[in-house]
Every structure is written in C-alpha cells, then in structure tokens.
Image (cartoon, rainbow, N blue to C red):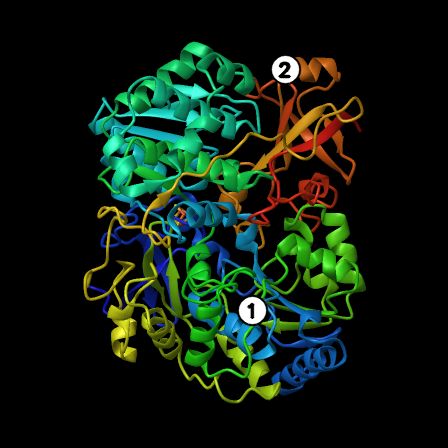
Amino acid sequence: MKNTAVKLKQTTCPYCGVGCGIDVNMDSMTLTQVNGSSEHPANFGRLCVKGSSVLETNDVSGRLLQPMIGDSAASWDEAISHVASGFKQVIDEHGPQAVAFYVSGQLLTEDYYVANKLMKGYIGAANIDTNSRLCMSSAVAGYKRAFGSDTVPCNYEDLEDTDLLVLVGSNAAWTHPVLFQRMERAKKLNPNLQVVVVDPRKSATTELADIHLAIKPGTDVALFNGLLHYIANNQALDTDYISQFTEGFDACLASVEQASLEQTAAICDVDVDDLARYFALFVNSPSAITFYCMGVNQSSQGTDKCNAIINCHLATGKIGKVGSGPFSITGQPNAMGGREVGGLANMLAAHMDIQNPQHTDLVQRFWQSPTISTEMGAKAVDMFEKIQNGDIKAVWIMATNPAVSLPNGNSVADALKNCPLVVVSDCNENTDTSAWADVRLPATGWSEKNGTVTNSERRISRQRGLLPPSGQAKHDWQIICEVAKAMGFEQGFDYQHPYQIFDEHARLSAFENNGTRDFDISGLVGLSEAEYDKFRPIQWPVNAAYPQGRARMFDDGKFFTPSGKAQFISVTAQAPKQLTSAEYPLVCNSGRIRDQWHTMTRTGKAAKLTAHISEPFVAMHPDDANLYQLQENQIAKISSAFGDTLLKVKIDSGQRKGELFAPMHWTKQFASRSNINVLYAPAVDPISGQPELKHAAVKIEAY
Ligand code: SF4
C-alpha cells in the first residue's frame, strides 16, 4: 500500500560545483532517503557517493546549537549586540578597513548578497573575501581579461557533444564524479571522442584518457603557448574569427614565437610524440572543450594559465559553439553564486567592478546606501596577513575553516589567536577555526537552509529548507541582517524571507544594464514566495532575449569588453614561487580524495565515506621511496620552510619522480599532525590573489 506520509522534496547537493539536484523523501519531520533528481539537468538522476550519503552527515551531533560568547552560552540578543558593538567600536577607533568578513562557497546566494551589501555599502570597506578565492579566482580573472566579464561560456552538454575533451589539472573522477560519469558515458556512446588528460600524476581520471600528459608541475603556460605556436604553424588559425571577433592576436602570436613543439616538450618534460598527438587532435577536431580546475587555478600564475588556454580557443574559433570552449569548473556548490553577488574583495554586486566609478555609483544608488567602497579590499591570504600584523582587528568568519585551509596554516592560526575580535558563524560546534573564536553563532546547515546556488554551468537552483533550524540556529542571512540592524543600519536589511533578497539581487542585475553586463536575471524579477519555492533550475542570463535561460555564451561573437571583442592576452611562463633546493628537493602537490569534502567537518561523520580512504597519506614514486629509505605505510615527516606534517607513505608508481601528493582534507581536528596546508608558502597569483596550493618545496624523512 502506498505510504501517504512520505513527501518528496527537491533540493541541491551541498558539496561540489556540479550542483546535482537531490530528491529527498520525508516522513513527517524525518529525511528518510535521497535520490538523484531525474529532472535536474546537472545530473539527470545520478549522484556520487558523497551526495548519496548526505543524510548520514545530517544529524545534530557536533552541531553548534546556541550562541556562545567565550565559553558561556548567550542569548541571541546578547550575541548580536556583542558582535555589533565590537565591530562598531573597531570601526569608530580604527576606521572601516580594520574589520573584515571571510565567507564561503557554502553560503547560499542570499546569504552572500547581504554580507557583501553590509560590508561594501554600509561599513564602507571591501574587506569581504571568500574561500572561493582558493578555488576559482584565477578562472574569474582569466575570463575577465579575455571576455571583459566573468562569463563561463559552456554547459555540461558540451562535454558530451564534443570531439575532443581536454582535462587540465583535474581529477574529475573523484572531484566532480557525476560530470565524469557523463564524460565516461559520452565516450562509450561515441568511441571517436578523444580524451586528453594533462596532470602530473596518474589518477582515476587518467584511466579514461587516450593521451595522458604528465607535465612537470607549473608548466601549463608553456604547454598552451606551445599549442598556440603549433596552431599557427599548421595552418589551423581561424583567421575569420580572429579578425571579426578578437583583438591582440599579432602580439600574442609574437610572444610564442620560440615555443616550438620540441622546446615545449622539453619544458613540460613530456614525450614529444604524445605532445604532437595532442596538438594535432586539437587542431583537427571540429570541436574541443578544455575543462580546467584547481591544477590550473591554484598557482602563482593561475590567471596566465587560464588565458593561455583561452588564447588557443580564440585562435581556432573553438568557443561559443556546440562542444567547444574553455570551461572552468568550480570546486564548491555556490562559488558561482558568490561571484554573482560580488562576494570577492575585488568585485561589486551583479558582476560589477569595484574600481569602476560608474558601477560603484550605480550600486550605491540602487542600494540607497550611506557609502560604497571604491577600492579593492584584502583578498584571502592578504586578509589573514593583515590580521596577523594588526591592521585588521575584527573578523567574522562564516561557514569556513581557514585555520587549516589557507596556506601557511601555522601563521593563520597565530593571526586568529592574536586578533582582538574573532566571530565564527558555523553549523559545527568545534572546528579548527572556532577554537580561536570569541563569539560563536549557530548557523543552519544543509536541509535547513533555504535559498539558491549556482553551479559551474551558470545554472541557478534552489536549495530548499526541508527541516526547521536545529536548536537555536538561524540562517546566515538572518544573522547578518540582525547584526547590520544592531550596528544602526536599519534601512537596507529588513527582509523576512530569502525570496525578497533574491528579488533585490535580480533587480540589481537588471538596473541600468542595457545589455552591457553579462549577469542579467531581469527575467526573474518579481517572483512571489510561492514562485520562488517552485523555482526550476535555469542558466543565467534570464532576460527578455533569453526567457528560458541561455545555454551557451558568445555564440553571437559579442563580448563584454569596451570594443565588444575578445582579447588575446600574451603570457610568458614563470616558475612557481616555492622552488626546490638542496634542502627541500621534492615538490608536494595537494588535492581531494573521492569521498571526503574540504576539511571533513561533515563527510568525516559518515562511516561509509571514511571507509574509502581512512587515513591521510603521502604518495611517492617507488624510486623516491628507495632513495629516502621509506616503506609502504611507514610514517614520514614532510617539512617545508613553513611547517611540517606527518603522513603515512603510499608507494605509487603513478607519481612522477621527485614529486609527492597528499590529500588536503585532514586537519588538526581529525589527525593532529597531518594537515598539509602548513607546508605551503603564502604565495599568490598577483592578479587573482589565488594561493599556490599545488607546489610546495619539501623534504621527506622517516619519523
Ligand atoms: Fe554532490 Fe558533486 Fe557528487 Fe553531484 S557530483 S552528488 S554535486 S558531490
């Protein structure tokens, strides 16, 4: 007999940037089962093991259930008043630049929107940055330099409808599993689809590759400059496209004059025949996608790497067409939504620029705010350095764990220890970061939060509140608005429901836009609460021209630069910042494993997920193990100039010699000495500010 008590609710997975839809069965107030939503265009019913285990991580154990001031429970009124007066006092004494918000790709768009509005339009500084800085800020900067806007051109169907799929710096099989399943299926259905994987190490993803280019870490710019040289020297330029839709080609071509096939193979340390096969495939394939991720972005030259990729697509006209384009993939579920509302220290809301006076004027008029920041704020690494040196004296950290996720983790923890006011809002009671908090504010978690997220293909979906808040937890947007009001900003934060914030966000995207800005969701203005609740996933822009959303950008050859043309950017290969030496002879790379998420605050709770790989490890080539006299499973100490960590040795012939790999998930909370971010220098890309989390110079020894 049918169980009439079971209700079906649709929401979105809280983990990676694929943004899969999830159908949840509810029996009264209990979530009983999850399945991939067959209607959601990101996953069509699929889920990976993380998504399908989400209920195992969703209990109240480990949740922060009431506000805390120091070690004492407090009422919400006391906690809000304490935070507001603390921030006000710092601002009164030291100015608005002395306070900061460090936010997260785990926040929903509505949370992000009000946090950004409070900091930039009311406090009057731009010291709001996000952990997405660690994930995709180089991709943003690369797009903006080339297209004049932070616009992802492609969509997931392009991955299936292409002749050539090039994955660069991505272990998608583990990090974006549902997209990888779509790639596997596409290759099965179309054996002519060629797959090239560019990654220093063998991984689950390289098993799909027709060609695996295990390049020397950090040589991506040389690789793609070599490809551009090859394109030009093999009569493969799309000269019509270049002359009609782009600028800067001649200078760019001149800059790669020396990048012969042989020289490129030598710099990248790959077989010249394999390289020639890849280059020939790119030139001869009618369509090609270059799919890139953290291996490209997390670099002191990440922005240049992105532009080197984009240059090759512009030179061959492989953009704005089915199955073609440079396609950056985000790590987090709402890194894109955060970009859209300007939750980065160098952006304004609705993809506007903080250093553009017309944009700051427009946003201030729209918000009717008392002020507007006209200068960039401190980006993530810079922000914690400013906390360390005392320039920033109050920080509010929302839904993220920077004490262990930022590079040079030891100094981040020191910075928080010495900061006069640290506020942490989080759904978890104890994190490595909350250990340093003066005030802890309980935030709602997945299954309670209600709002929107945007995935890697620009698709906005609803994350629906299925359960009431646990304990005294409140939604992030509510907490931010209450603090804003307590700081005296009554006007501007009087929302009763997230649909009102979304509506304001949509209206701002349309405000004096006239087609000059890429982010335009004017077609979503005026949704009622009921319409917002029923909202179906849709790809922005959503406007009069594209009322059902737009799957592919730049198919009309129009870009958002002042001239309307895409820009070639000349880039020159540079070495990573942390170079090997006699003392530190090895390179240490980092990444995700299949079943864990970030610093494990949620996935660490699920037995099913910890069963896959239960301990932190360092992978090394057998010859290196011999050289350093290390055995499988032996504990080794890995040290850099910035710190050291202890990891179990895993001998792996898929590693390049002289290079190590370690997962980034384990923190002091889960394994007291096994956090690897202590090894990384605080070196960042000079344009994007993204830290170089793939290249530490280290030594290894038996412990
Ligand atoms: Fe969630 Fe990503 Fe897995 Fe989809 S692929 S279920 S979004 S973790």
Q: In the image, 638: left or right of 217?
A: right
What residue is pinned by disc 2? 622
Residue at figure coordinates x 65%, y 13% from the top left: 623
Q: Position of residue 33 (x, y in %)?
A: 35, 57
Provide residue 371's location: percent of width, then percent of height.
55, 79
Mark 2 neighbour class, 10 Å CA radius: few under 14, some 14 to 19, many 20 or more: many
- Residue 377 percent coordinates (x, y): 61, 63
* Badge 1 amino acid: Thr
Q: Residue at x 37, y 23 (%)?
A: 209
Mark 1 residue CB less than 8 A from any atom of ligand 1: no
Residue 287 vs residue 616, the one in the foreground = 287
Q: Is residue 498 above or below residue 150?
A: below
Residue kind at label 2, given as amino acid type: Pro
Q: On the rendered image, what quadrant is the N terminus found in? A: bottom left
Q: Can residue 468 be seen in this snapshot?
A: no
Rendered view: 359 above or below 549: below
User: Quadrant of residue 580 in the image?
Assistant: top right
Vertical relation: 388 (above or below) 470: above
Q: Is residue 631 left or right of residue 132?
A: right
In the picture of the structure, the residue carrying the numbered disc 1 is: 374
Local SS, label 2:
helix
Q: Which mark is residue 232?
A: none
**Which-is-in-front pick, marks 1 and 2?**
1
